[in-house]
Amino acid sequence: MRRHKLLVLGAAAGGGLSLLAVLGAALGWWWLVVLAAMLLATAVLLAALDTDRRVRELRSFVKAQVAGIDTTGGRAAPAQEDVVGTVRALQAQYTGRLDRLQDTLEATIRQRDERG
């Protein structure tokens, strides 16, 4: 609701200053036109500075939140022995599969040679 009120207030201020500038131009009061234009330009500058400040705060907030994320999922990092043991188990499985493949290949070649 606050954003909506701020938007309505900003639109009203911009419209009022623009109307003041048009009125000053119609009456030939150029100092009023310049004053209205400067006030409008100052309001735009302040809005831009506030937006920049908010973006910078959001960046630092997001970086802090991302840095605080626990990527391990609550698990401890594996020890060196665990990694070595896992690699050895995978190596043994791979070697066993290769041995079975070689035995199957040799049996197939023998059967083919026996058939002629």
Image (cartoon, rainbow, N blue to C red):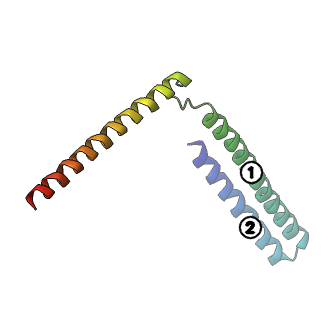
Answer above or below: position of 103 versus 33: above
In which quadrant is the N terminus drawn? top right
Is disc 2 surrounded by few (<14), some (14 to 19) or many (20+) residues within 10 Å?
some
**Decide: marks 1, 2 in contact (CB < 8 A)?**
no
Residue found 57% across the figure and 32% down from its top: 69
Position of residue 8 measured from the top left corner of the image (x, y, whole percent): 62, 53
Q: How many marks?
A: 2
The foreground one among 37 and 76 is 76
Q: Is residue 104 left or right of residue 97?
A: left
Residue placed farthest to the left in the image?
Answer: 115
Residue tagged 1: 52
The foreground one among 115 and 27 is 115
Q: Secondary structure at mark 2?
A: helix
Residue found 70% across the figure and 40% down from its top: 60
Mark 1 belongs to which amino acid?
Asp
Mark 2 belongs to which amino acid?
Ser
Position of residue 94 measured from the top left corner of the image (x, y, whole percent): 36, 39
Is disc 1 surrounded by few (<14), some (14 to 19) or many (20+) residues within 10 Å?
few
Q: Nearer the viewer, mark 1 or mark 2?
A: 1
Position of residue 112 measured from the top left corner of the image (x, y, whole percent): 14, 57
Q: Earlier in the sequence, mark 1 or mark 2?
A: 2
Position of residue 10 measured from the top left corner of the image (x, y, whole percent): 68, 55
Q: Is residue 29 left or right of residue 68?
A: right
Q: Is residue 98 left or right of residue 63?
A: left
In which quadrant is the C terminus drawn? bottom left
Residue found 67% across the figure and 57% down from its top: 12
Q: Which quadrant of the figure has residue 27?
A: bottom right
Residue placed farthest to the right in the image?
Answer: 31
The foreground one among 15 and 106 is 106
Residue tagged 2: 18
Residue found 78% across the figure and 56% down from its top: 43
